[in-house]
Amino acid sequence: MSKFKNKKNIVVFCRSGARSSQAKSILEQNGFQNVINGKTWQNVKEVVSGVTEK
C-alpha cells in the first residue's frame, strides 16, 4: 500500500465492479481518502477517452 501514498487520486476498477468496491473499502479502511470506484473497465475507458454513453 505504500505505493499509493502521495497519489492525488486512486481509481480502482474490475470487470464487474464488485471487486473494485471491495478494493475501495479496503483502501479507505487503511486511511486513503482519495479513492474513486471506477466500477468497470468500460466506465473508466469512457471517462479517460472522453466518451459518454447517452
Image (cartoon, rainbow, N blue to C red):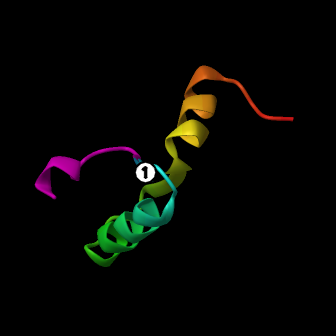
Identify the image quadrant of residue 47: top right
Q: Is residue 9 magenta?
A: yes
Image position, residue 31 (x, y; %): 29, 72
Image position, residue 35 (x, y; %): 43, 58
In the displayed structure image, the side of residue 27 where residue 41 appears, left or right: right
**Most foreground residue, 2 or 11:** 11
Identify the image quadrant of residue 34: bottom left
Residue receiving disc 1: 14
Q: Is residue 19 magenta?
A: no
Image position, residue 8 (x, y; %): 37, 44
Q: What span is colored magenta in the figure? A: 1-10
Q: Amino acid at mark 1?
A: Cys
* Main SS category, magenta section: loop
**Most foreground residue, 8 or 11:** 11
Q: Count the marks.
A: 1
Image position, residue 43 (x, y; %): 60, 41
